[in-house]
Amino acid sequence: LKEIEDRHLATIKKLISIKAQSRVLSKVKSELNTLETLLKVAFLIGEITPKLSDKIVSYGELLSSYIISEFFAEAGLDVVHKDSRELIKTNNVNGKAAVNFKLTDHLCTDFIAKPPHKIIVLAGFIASAENGGSTTLGRGGSDYTAAIVAAALNADLLEIWTDVSGMYTANPRLVKQAKAIPHISYEEAMELSHFGAKVLYPPTIQPVLSKGISIQIKNTFDPDNPGTIITKNKNEKGKTVRGITHVGNIALLSLEGPGMVGIPGISKRFFEVLSQSGISVVLITQASSEHSICVGISADDVEEAEGSVNEAFAYELGSGKINPVLVESNLAIIALVGDNMKSHQGLSGKMFSTLGRNNVNIRAIAQGASERNVSAVINKEDVKKALNSLHEEFFEENIKQLNLFVMGVGNVGGKFLNQIKQQQKFLKENLKINPRVIGLSNSRTMVFDEDGISLKNWESVLSKGEKADKSKFFETVNTLNYRNSIFVDNTASTEVSNTYNSYLGNSISVVTCNKIACSSDYTNYLKLKALAREYNAPFLFETNVGAGLPIIDTLKHLIASGDKVIKIQAVLSGSLNFVFNNFNDKTTFHDVVKQAQEEGYTEPDPKIDLSGIDVMRKILILARESGYQLEIDDIKNNPFLPQESLDTTNNEAFFATLKKHEMAFQELYKKAFESGCKLKYVAQFEKGKASVGLQEIPKGHDFYNLEGSDNIVLFFTERYPTQPLIIKGAGAGADVTASGIFADIIRIGNF
């Protein structure tokens, strides 16, 4: 109470001149003394009755309206302060009283008929019963007060000033792209306000609706903004969906059982029980078989509702005709609202498919007979994702926002982020895709920004992030629960690849250049594919083979169209092709491999490339994508490296062995050169068997003139039996690998 008093007195001293302060302070202190007495009474009796509560809470509006009226008078305005309890009369119910409109209208018109003041200041929210006791009009009752008076006086316009610029297409606190609605009908406004658009108290509309009085919602902090105008006229040419809203803290109460079928009166009894318990039903669905009834109620009423219904149907429960009430909690209702929805086909389907694509599970569905509202009950934690997904679908000019969570920002990852920065405007304008990086991690630090990490200075932002933790990274991605979430793996880490199951199982798409997952156990490979299908989360790995070349995608299309692979011949290592294209009798093998590593053609550990394991993984992936069940151990590897090189445990020791065995490498080159051949590291798959190894390629072969770090793949299929389908191009390097990852992300954006 002391804090309340201090705040009121400070406001008076700030707004009212010293000359008038003593009078205003005296009045306010007198009222606060009365309030103190009421609080002492509540303390002494040990409770606050509904009647006492209404009396206590009325002081807030009474005091603030009085102070404002005095401030207006100080400014020279012709103003009077009127106690609204003398004008607005209700029944004797405390907490949310019902207005006696006939008596209220008479009192209001009678008061205005007296010598008028230009400005009348009334306290909102409060009223009085016919016996004179204070009552309140419920939360948001100040708007309701204004509407009651406007209707009583047949006003031309009701203005409601608040802290936002009107009604929005969605809650701007949850949907940052939400837009103000310039014009809306009474019916649409009632639907939106009932379903959680808190800018307008639902009962506010009813008094002015009957008189055809328009409502304008304006922003106190932006008075020049036109806000939203609410009228009886429907905007036939406006958007089909006017707004998306939600009600949180909902529970579903389900009554079902074989004894309900064809038995009259079950529904009546069910709703009577809820009504007698003072429980408001916000949503109703019933199976056409009459086997079940499901209603949405406030989660605060669950315990009372469950007990009351089970008690009322005790006989049916005991005989097994009806099952005990089933309760589902932690739910919310989302709703599409619009007068024009009934004249457009497919809106419900569009709504449900959008939610389904983003793994938002629907627990119940309801649609009003007017078709002005389509509602769905979903899990409470999915509300933000659902609202943003639907808003993107219905209001954002079909611009699809992709939320990226990127792990690995080395050579490939850095190029990838730069490519996004360069192409962001083009993608938004031409492909209607807006990729933004929400999470970023390297091996040391990680950072998240719900508004998107700036790609102009991502290095600086990441350096200031928290300690990297792969498990925590996933937990954060999952908790954020964004629609169109994509995890991007730019690493070569087994530990990171082991997290794909978690991402896909939570409907988070995965794009990766990391070959480890797809070349792991065949059962794991199949599981990842199955998770991607089950949870509608694309799992794309085009860059696993050939960097940015469309090898895997082409192969998928061949198989999907009914073709069958007979044989695959390929040079799949851009790094090995670079090495053998540059190695000759005037260079050393050690120096060429070192150059390949420095220019980013090899893995950080070049032994992975030169040992053939990288090529083995690639041909394994191609064989699996061709429909064959194969494990890495089934592939025959014919290594050209000495065993001593293969046994090394670090790069320094590895390069030392290359120097030591230079003569052996020169012999390989000399033998091929004298035969008129070139050395190429070839992968082959035929008749269910795969092998990799160094081969001497003669002139005239498709591999002979393969330059630089290029890759080439020859697909011999039933449709291409003698003249193979050939894919050829740059198959190594950070830029082309990054572009392949980027292409996979764009592919998801176009799904």
Image: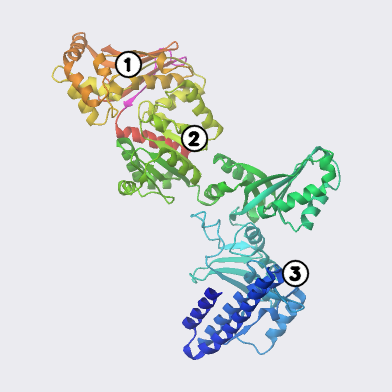
Which residue does the image show at 67% across and 79% down from the upper left? 84
User: Quick check: 206 left or right of 495?
Assistant: right
Identified by mark 3, the residue type is Val
Answer with the quarter of the image where residue 102 lies. bottom right
Q: Which residues are magenta?
A: 717-731
Residue 724 image label: none
Instruction: Estimate the spatial distance between the alpha carbons at disc 3 and disc 1, rounded to whole Å.
Output: 87 Å
User: Quick check: 445 left or right of 376?
Assistant: left
Q: Which residue is mark 2?
A: 502
Q: How many marks?
A: 3
Tell me the crowding category of disc 3: few under 14, some 14 to 19, or many 20 or more residues within 10 angstroms, Cα based: some
Q: Which residue is mark 1?
A: 682
Which residue does the image show at 83% across and 40% down from the upper left? 318
- Camera-side residue: 423 or 585? 585
Task: Based on the picture, tell me whether residue 724 belongs to the magenta stretch.
Answer: yes
- Camera-side residue: 468 or 99? 468
Position of the N terminus, as image quadrant, is bottom right
Give the vertical position of 725 relative to 14 (above or below): above
Instruction: Estimate the spatial distance between the alpha carbons at disc 3 and disc 2, rounded to whole Å.
Output: 54 Å
In front: label 3 or label 1: 3
Q: Earlier in the sequence, mark 1 or mark 2?
A: 2
Task: Based on the picture, tell me whether residue 56 belongs to the magenta stretch.
Answer: no
